[in-house]
Amino acid sequence: MKVSQGTSSRWPRGRVRSVVWALISAGVLMGCSLPNPPEVVKPPPVVDTMPPAAPAGLTATASSAGIVLKWTANTEADLAGYRVLRSPIAGGPFTVLTPTPLTASTYTDTSAQPGQMAYYQVVAVDKKGNASGPASASAIRPLGADVTPPAVPTALTATDSGAGIALNWADSPEPDLAGYRVLRSASAGGPFALLTPTLLSVSAYTDAAAPQGQTSFYQVIAVDGSGNASAPAPVSATRLAASAVRGRVSLESLDGGPFADRMVFSRIGSLSSPPGNGVHDRAVLRVKNSGSGDLQITGLPLTDGWVLESAPALPLTLRAAEVLDLKLRFVAQDVQVHSGTLSVVSNDPTASNKAMQLAGLWQSQSENNAEPSLEQIMQDGFGFKTAFAPGSNVNQQGRVTPQGDEVIAPYWQRADPSQPVAVQQLAAYHTQGDSTALKWFAKGSGTENVVMIHAGADGQTVLPRLSNSPDLARSTFSPAQTFGLKVDFENSDPALNYQDLDVRHGCAAPCGQHVRFFVARDRSNQILPNTYLLIMDYEGINYDYNDNIYLINNLKPASLLINVGTTGQQFTAPDGNVWFSDRDRNGYAPFTPPDAKDEPSGGPNPGLDILNTTNDALYRSYRGNVGALNPRSISFNIPLENGPHTLRLHFADLAHTEAGKRVFDVVAEGRMALPSLDIVKEAGNGKTALVKTVAVTVDGGLLTLTLTASVDYPALAGIEVVR
């Protein structure tokens, strides 16, 4: 094939080569050769030059804190953010306020000059750097706006706490302080990253994310309510590796109160002229390094109301096993209840800011109705969650009726017989100058054993001291049998107390409840095992039950043992247990009708042999004869705390030896417990002991038993509430 010379002159060289190579490939130009292969012409790359849309809906709102710009967010997928520019002239030139594009569709200009018009442009920028046209707005920041920045934060320290780098600084004195910003960098020259997007309200911060094994550089900036920011305060610290040997903080109150992490104080009147009372306004907190490395203490922040006497210079280092004793003094002069903390800021990796809780009770004068209440002492002061009289008044004029977490227990036993009972007096708020004796006595005995006596000077304080001793009132005792407690002349068994003044104050029998016991609940509302609070008030005073308060552990309530059918008597069973009559020495009877007869009519026969028991004396008396009443029914109403209980009811038929001669129902707490009970039938004979176990759930603070006979009268010999 012959190629025309004119043809090639009209085609571009690249086009000719392409055609020739196409002919060769098709077999048309055989034997021809070309110097080079064809050039492949690539189209030019596509370049994004399309800018985003200009931000819409731009508004500028002025206030003394600055000018707030807001706009509608753009929807472009490749949007990088927004630049904000400002000028004092509408036509510019404009200064960029945000060198790094904003990702939010709002901006507050806190540097705008008050009283001057500020012109703004907001420009959208995509990831290729294309910028939209500007959206415009303007506003005037009001005159008088605060443009003065706060002072630079002072006394800034940084310490490896184990849990991170702990920063502490002095509180800013600025009256319009809004808070603080904390920033961090890997180098002193930055750049710095903001760690606290929300302003801090306290002058401390722990950077838990600080890298281990490296030095971190920090800036702390104070910000006021107008948005003005101080110059940064710099500091740096190195966070040790997790495997580094460290100190450990342990705190011990040398008061030895009921909770290891709480100290309780009290004082009276002014600091300049307090009364001569003994008060508990000073105590020592021991700080110990229980770790194997050095413990660095950098801060001891303390709540108002307390001061450190002879405060140590900080920072300080405690070597392993070294201790630091901090002397605390309660200095409040107003407000009855105070709460606070003393914190130990250190490099302990497990507790970089370990706190001891503080509570203080202040009263304006000694006695004269200025004393703290029971709840203020025990709940606000010592921190117990025990409920004393929820929704009601603890003053019941001495009536025996449980309230809150109260336990009805006139007598007690050791929970662990191998250990002593331990007691500490928590408070005394009675006649100043009078000492108080705590005693115990064996059930049924008149012999009293003194446990301890508190100092008369400490008649208006928490944690009184022992008489004639600087030590706090604490002691132990080890009774071998069931025992009662006595505070001065007031007994844990209300039947042993004088009750005339109770009645005059309106007490409805049973009365005499001047010594009361409550379950001890800790600050998590958990019951402390075998631990009770004893509260008491002297007969006929005001029944506020803050006169003497004790914490007692290793004890449990003894079973209630009631010998039915006698008046004002007691006996000791072969097992050593003491039983008291169902009609006490004051004539109070827990049964209805109250004139139900003691039986047998001539009194118990001390020689009568009762079969099927060694406790014959219990079954030699009984009660149930209600005379002409119809139905022939007797009810027992026994004060008892709410909840599940186990009863053991004791029976013996002393009048019949044949079945069917005495039949009655026993209803406990409104539920049929023993239907058609025939003692002889079940015991196998007359004069034979029969014991029935009944499970009940008490409600309303009163155990109610009702016996109703269909044949003859009911007959009950004993009631045992098993504890």
Image: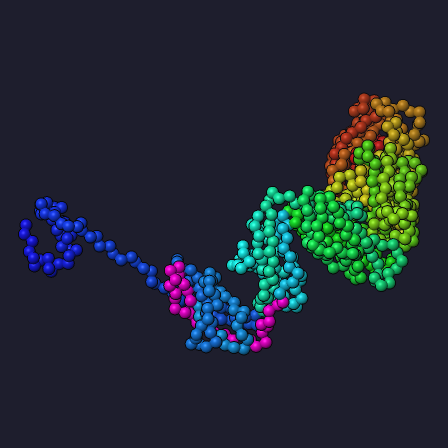
- Magenta includes 214? no
Q: Residue at x 17, y 50 (%)?
A: 36
Instruction: Name the spot of residue 18 as percent of width and height, x first.
Output: 15, 52
Relative to 406, say whether 365 is above or below: below
Could you tell me what secondary structure mostly forms the magenta stretch?
Answer: loop
Query: Furthest-left residue in view?
Result: 2
Instruction: Provide the residue span drawn in magenta.
Output: 123-151
Instruction: Name the spot of residue 700 as percent of width and height, x first.
Output: 76, 44
Instruction: Name the spot of residue 114 as percent of width and height, x first.
Output: 55, 75
Relative to 673, say whether 351 is above or below: below
Q: Residue at x 85, y 39 (%)?
A: 476
Q: Is residue 130 visible?
A: yes
Instruction: Name the spot of residue 563 as percent of width and height, x first.
Output: 87, 33
Q: Quadrant of residue 715?
A: top right
Q: Is residue 631 visible?
A: no
- Along the line of sight, which residue is nearer the eye, 430 or 33? 33
Q: Residue at x 67, y 66 (%)?
A: 173
- Along the line of sight, which residue is nearer the eye, 278 or 94? 94
| Label tally | 0
Q: Quadrant of residue 648?
A: top right
- Along the line of sight, which residue is nearer the eye, 534 or 338? 338
Location of the C terminus by quadrant is top right
